[in-house]
Amino acid sequence: MTSKVVLAYSGGLDTSVAVAWLREQVNMEVIAVVVDVGQGGDFEAIRRRALGAGALDCVVVDARDEMANSYVVPAIAANGLYEGRYPLVSALSRPVIVKHLVAVARSVGATSVAHGCTGKGNDQVRFEVGTKSLAPDLDILAPARLWGMSREDLLRYANDRGIAVEATGTKLYSIDENLWGRAIECGVMEDPWASPPDDVYELTRQSADVPVEMVLTFEQGVPVALDGVTMPLPELIASVSRIAGSYGWGRVDMVENRRVGIKSRETYECPGALAIIMAHNDLEALVLERDLAHEKQRLEPRWAELVYDGLWFSPLKHALDAFFAETQRYVTGEVRLRLTPGNCIATGRRSPYSLYDYNLATYDPDDAFKHEYAEGFVRIWGLGVATWAGKQGDGVGAPGTASGNQGQR
Ligand code: ARG
């Protein structure tokens, strides 16, 4: 009996060639799996293409709700931004895809899974480490790392076999998209000094110029409503994205450290993700106690790194999720964002669990803060350095020096 391989299929040239290649070179039956994580596209046409390329079957999974509720929600709780800037768009979708690959592999009795990633990127890491963390017994095949074909070779390979490919033979950029945003790589942007051409952007072309406000409502860290209208998360993200993007806001242009040791120039547009994280962060500032907030902020970059590095299904990442989930208990309330061309800022926040106490904060006559207590507090707070200054600080002669410690600290 021929063994079966389950291939993560996108409908693009590489994964279409991979279907034929796996049959011909490895002599396996290929089951293609297309996971809808909000990338858009005609899934029926993609399914036909997989079958046309020789797949035994093609399974299309609608994972948009799952992506939003089980992957984006924890990312919001963690204010997930890799290297402080990238909202982990591709990194969040790969574990969703892996989960379904493994599920299909189990249901059809496959011995392997396959992906179409090259050897230079993070996505291969996420597919493979993710698969191994869910199903250590499955083999992994990465045809694009083995076949050594250029884009021209791939087109010829597809042509010779009558495999349908996208309309044009030229492809300028490598694009990965889902409901959390869009990543654009390659082409002229491989020069980190070169400005991305205007045409790489789709979600952030400015069409609006009259300033607008939007109010995001959160319940326990989860965005649930926009301007008072409750909606499912995928829809809410899409709406926020559309509005923020129409002000030409939500772009990230950065040089990023890939897990595989390469620095790469990355261009992203993630207006929805960035606006939601901004609002979420802002609400946390209102409701989280200081030590909790500071400790959480220290752990957030670690979470983003683990997710970026393909360790979604790992014990440390799970433990951090549990910590973040606990912190979200009172992250309920509203944040108002104001949009103007090229800009988005929070201009208001409120919560039933707000720790902001007007009577403590105000300089008005309502002031309830005990000013006289501050004197003793500040003296004792500074006692350690006052003692130090008297014995060892600047201006005190230190052993072996003529003039004390000036300039040495
Ligand atoms: N650099 C980003 C990441 O590693 C984006 C990857 C985009 N993937 C792609 N196949 N174009 O998450």
Image: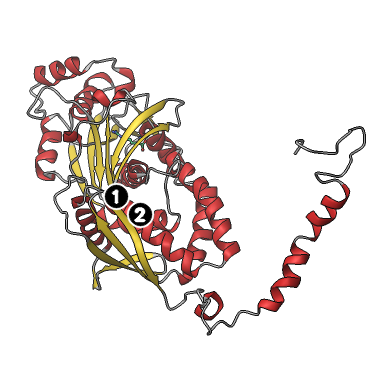
Residue receiving disc 1: 180
Name which residue lies at 29% across and 40% down. 268
Contact (Cβ within 8 Å) of mark 2 with mark 1: yes
**Residue 186 image offset from top left, x and y in percent:** 27, 26
Residue at 26% across / 29% down in the picture? 195
Residue 171 numbered tag: none
Q: Is residue 158 left or right of residue 393?
A: left
Residue at the location (28% across, 17% down)? 147
Label 2 sits on residue: 72
Amino acid type at circle 2 is: Val
Q: Which quadrant does ligand 1 occupy?
A: top left
Q: Amino acid at mark 1?
A: Trp
The answer as to whether callout 1 falls within 8 Å of ligand 1 is: no
Quarter occupied by the C terminus = top right
Q: Residues within 10 Å of mark 2 (few under 14, many from 20)?
A: many
Above or below 140: residue 106? below
Q: Is residue 306 left or right of residue 238?
A: right
Give the image location of residue 259, x and y in percent.
45, 31
* Viewport quadrant of the N terminus: top left
**Mark 2 or mark 1: whose residue is earlier in sequence:** 2
